[in-house]
Each structure stands twice: as structure tokens, then as C-alpha cells.
Image: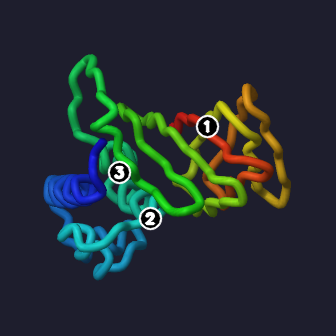
Amino acid sequence: MTSSREVLDRIAQRLRQERQARGFSQAALAERSGVSLRMLALIEKAETNPSIATLAEIAAGLGISLGALVGSGDEAAARVIPPQDFATVWQSPAGSARLLASGGKAELWDWRIETGGRYDASPDPAGTMELIQVQEGVLVLEVDGATHAVPAGHALRLASDRAYAYRAEGGPVRFVKVVS
């Protein structure tokens, strides 16, 4: 499994490469993404652990997917991705999120929310869609003032360009999702 340090170093390197390839200064990217100049500088030096929402804002400012920013950048026609290359992008006592694979404009994620845990998400870029399949437990989704309980074996579609939250009640929840 990839360590947190390796993920931070990879993100720092990819951010710098993508920013420079577009001819953006850190200040220009800060303006385009809405992420502070100080935060961008810390991320490029791998001195902070940014949230998924912050990384999504930076990726949108660069005009790339979150997966392109945190992934390996390998664009081969086919690539087997071993578990040690999965990137744990969020981890706390409430749960974890691992980016398993990305390509084009799609990302494949594996999530776990612990009993009583919650993840509050900021809106993704306009038009972003999530397809989720619950593998164990009951995922409780809060979006647009409504609550949806999604049991194991069920799937859901979420327009994630708005604030939403995942939570687990009555036991841990594990789900996979594709973000596009």
C-alpha cells in the first residue's frame, strides 16, 4: 500500500508539473481554483495533507480530473494497478477513501465509513456525477435536504455538484463509486 508520504510527494510533483505545463504561476492557479496561494505552496512542497475538496478545486482550476492530479499519470492503453499503488486520499477515525484507478474523466474509489462516522463533502465541479454501489452496511446519503438510506447490494446515482454527506448508522459501511 502506498504510504501517506508517497501520496503527498506524488501530488506535489503532479501539481507542480501540471501548473507549469499550463504556464500558471501559483498566484494564477490560486485565483483560478479558489484555493489560497499559501495552501498551494504548502501542497507543492508536500508539507500539508489537503482535503479531497481542496484537491478537486485545484484539479478543476487546472482543467484536469482529481484522478489525474493524484494518480500515477500512466496513460497506457491498459494497466494493472496493484493494491500497493492505491492512493489513500482521506483517512480519519470516521473512515477512509482510496482512489483505486483513474483514467480520462473517470475515477474508481473504495470507501469505508465507520459506525457513527460521517464525511461532509463540498460540491464537486458542475456536472460531476457519482455512481455508487454499497457492498456492506447501509449508506446514509444527505443531499438537498433529503436523506437516502442505501442498503448493501443497492446502487445510487448522485449529482455531486452540490454539498452532500455520507454517514454510517448501525454498523460500518463499505461502498465503491465511480466519479465522472
Compared across the picture, whether 169 is left or right of 106 comes to: right
Compared across the picture, whether 48 is left or right of 133 comes to: left
Compared across the picture, whether 22 is left or right of 177 comes to: left
Q: Nearer the viewer, mark 1 or mark 2?
A: 1
Q: Residue at label 3? A: 63
How far from the left and from the top, in percent, is residue 85? Answer: 28, 37
**N-terminal-most mark, 3 or 2:** 2
Element type at marker 2?
loop
> Where on the picture, by quarter, is residue 15?
bottom left
Residue type, numbered disc 1: Phe
How did the renderer colour the structure?
rainbow
Identify the image quadrant of the N terminus.
top left
Q: Residue at x 38, y 33 (%)?
A: 101
How far from the left and from the top, in percent, is residue 74? Answer: 21, 32
> Where on the picture, by quarter, is residue 119?
bottom right
Q: Residue furthest top?
A: 78
Disc 2 crowd rating (10 Å Cα; few below 14, some 14-19, many 20+) is few
Residue type, numbered disc 3: Gly
Q: Residue at label 1? A: 175
**N-terminal-most mark, 1 or 2:** 2
Compared across the picture, whether 94 is left or right of 149 comes to: left
How far from the left and from the top, in percent, is residue 108? Answer: 47, 34
Are the residues flagged by discs 3 and 2 in contact, CB closer than 8 Å?
no
Q: Residue at x 25, y 75 (%)?
A: 42
> Where on the picture, by quarter, is residue 47?
bottom left
Residue type, numbered disc 2: Ser
